[in-house]
Every structure is written in C-alpha cells, then in structure tokens.
Image (tube, rainbow, N blue to C red):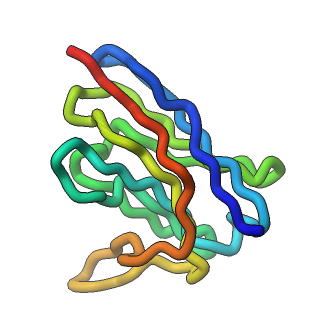
C-alpha cells in the first residue's frame, strides 16, 4: 500500500526553526515528484515547494524562498522540510505529497508543482507564535 506520514509539527516562536519529516512506503521517492503543501487558517491549500527527482527541477513559493529547504534520504525513503526564520504567517497544517509523474509543470516560462498530486499524507500542524 502507498502511504505517506508527515510528522514533526509543533509550537515554535517567530524566528525559530523546525524540521518536518515525511516517511513513505509502497514506492520510491527517487522516481517521482515530491512536494510540501500547507493550508493556513482561512486560506486555500497552497504549494510550498516541490522537486522533480528525475531532473532536479524545483519550485519555491515566494513566501518561503531563502527560508525553507526540501531534502530527502533515499535509504530511508523519507523527505524533509527544513523551516528556518519562521514567521506567524507560516502557521498552517503542512502536508507532504507525491505525484507519479516525475516532472514539474512548465507554463508561461516558469515551473510549477503539479496541480493535482496523486498521494497525500496526513497533515502536521505548525504553529508560530509572536
């Protein structure tokens, strides 16, 4: 069975750091597009960042550039979201997701995360206080 499990959320103060983990089973991250999404209070779910593991193409939301980094451990089939310099507006439920197509979408001269990810993990709540 294909499963994704996100963990590592919690309460942190503004300016702090947190690392989220997403453990996968049933498939290999190396041949897929992987992503982190989030849903903030009162807002729609949005793509935070994603990467195509086939060619390395990446997308970062403008709001997290320079602060968030995605990485993976192929041996453990786990990916991570390192969040630094956290802000109150980063408060949201964070989800890891995987798309079977190993490439980001290209439109209008830019790359974007797939519109519809194939698999979703349970979200983990990140709360940033000021």
Q: Residue 52 location in percent, x, y?
A: 54, 70
Q: Residue 40 location in percent, x, y?
A: 25, 44
Q: Residue at x 40, y 19 (%)?
A: 11
Q: Compared to 126, does 45 lie above or below? A: below
Left or right: where does residue 22 sit relative to residue 48?
right
The quarter of the displayed image where residue 119 is located = bottom right
Q: Residue at x 39, y 31 (%)?
A: 126
The quarter of the displayed image where residue 30 is located = bottom right
In the image, farthest residue toward the left: 42
Tally of numbered tags: 0
**Quarter holding the N terminus?**
bottom right
Q: Compared to 49, does 2 lie above or below? A: below
**Quarter holding the C terminus?**
top left
Q: Is residue 117 visible?
A: yes
Left or right: where does residue 43 sit relative to residue 99?
left
Q: Is residue 56 visible?
A: no
Looking at the picture, tell me which residue is in the foreground, 57 or 102.
102
Q: Compared to 126, does 42 lie above or below? A: below
Q: Residue at x 83, y 50 (%)?
A: 75
Q: Residue 43 location in percent, x, y?
A: 18, 52
Left or right: where does residue 17 sit relative to residue 76?
left
Left or right: where does residue 24 sit relative to residue 22?
right
């Amino acid at each position: 069975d294909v499963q994704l499990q996100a963990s590592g959320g919690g309460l942190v103060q503004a300016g702090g750091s947190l690392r989220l983990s997403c453990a996968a089973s049933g498939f290999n991250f190396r041949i897929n597009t992987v992503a982190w999404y989030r849903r903030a209070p009162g807002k729609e779910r949005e793509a935070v960042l994603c990467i195509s593991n086939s060619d390395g193409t990446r997308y970062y939301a403008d709001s997290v550039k320079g602060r968030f980094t995605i990485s993976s451990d192929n041996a453990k089939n786990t990916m991570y979201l390192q969040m630094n310099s956290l802000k109150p507006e980063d408060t949201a439920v964070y989800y890891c997701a995987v798309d079977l197509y190993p490439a980001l979408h290209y439109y209008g001269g830019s790359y974007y995360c797939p519109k519809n990810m194939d698999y979703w993990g349970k979200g983990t709540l990140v709360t940033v206080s000021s």
